[in-house]
Amino acid sequence: MSKLQILYSKELAKELGKIAVYLPGEQVVVGDIITFPNGNSFLGKSRPLGTFKKITSLQNLGVEYKEPSFSKKPDTYHFSSKNAVNFNFDVGTNADLGNEELPNGKANVKINFTNEGAIYFLAIDCDKKELNDLSALEKQINDKGGNLLWKNTYLVTSVTVAKKAFIAQSRSKTSELVIQSSLKGVQSGQLNLKADANLSLSKQQGDVFIKDWSDDVTVFMDLIKFEEEIFGKRHRGNKVILTDTPKTSRIVFKTVSIKELLTD
């Protein structure tokens, strides 16, 4: 299933500009140190794609930092794969879906996926918390002797948590979900839900990964990569020449860009 993991991560990076948590809702916090077993490119380059594995955390290693707080500036993200996800709304009434004063009641929403890997993503009231002063953190790590370096390993510098989320990815070429919502949640022929809305899955056909309508779902993260900078050597053309200076090294933080995720 690593192919579908990579598709999920790449599509959210391309369309939303975010590094996805896969599986969405997986437990990860600021300060965790993680690696991505399935993220290597064809040329062996490490990329933060797909599922991740925890190695340790700054807290476990005795690195001190101030625990960040949420920004209290929530955003909602609503996304579906282009030309691969179709919607059909059965409201069971003649009510005008463009009218804000809809009657109370239920509506069935049919979601059809027409490609393997197609995604429907709804994350409501997403709030973010992140580490501050990374330069001071980098210095502290190096002052401790640089013992926090692992190959292809990343530090989680922020997490974004949705107050409520419903996420699905088709694992077959065609699949279908039927979910039930309130009439007010399908205004203008879309799912326009609030965090206190009711949403329930009533039917499923085909192979679909589903993160059901859930509270406090971690959906995105920001990362920096640990890299080693070696001193005591110099370059002549394309050759590395060792000097008489003893070889030493220090850890440097490399920011992970969205562009990296999209290159093979």
Image: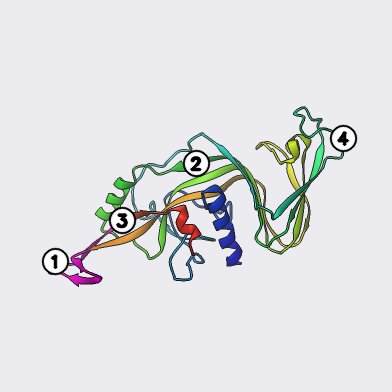
For residue 30, say whether it is visible. yes
List the residue tagged with mark 2.
128
Tell me the number on the disc at residue 120.
none
Instruction: Give amino acid for label 1.
Output: Thr
Task: Name the quadrant containing residue 131.
Answer: top left
Q: Earlier in the sequence, mark 2 or mark 4?
A: 4
Disc 2 and disc 3 in contact, CB within 8 angstroms:
no
List the residue tagged with mark 4.
94
Instruction: Give amino acid for label 4.
Output: Asn
Is 251 contained in the magenta span? yes
Query: Whole-percent x and y of residue 148?
Result: 34, 59
Name the outermost residue toward the top: 101
Q: Main secondary structure of the magenta part?
A: strand
Q: Earlier in the sequence, mark 2 or mark 1?
A: 2
| Direction from residue 97 to residue 28 in the image, left or right | left
Instruction: Give amino acid for label 3.
Output: Val
Q: Secondary structure at mark 1?
A: loop
Front tag of 1 and 4? 4
> Which residue is at the front of the view, 114 or 52?
114
Q: Earlier in the sequence, mark 1 or mark 4?
A: 4
Disc 3 and disc 4 in contact, CB within 8 angstroms:
no
How much space separates mark 1 and mark 3, taking CA atoms?
Answer: 20 Å
Which image quarter is the N terminus in?
bottom right
Q: Is residue 185 above or below residue 249?
A: above
Tell me the number on the disc at residue 245.
1
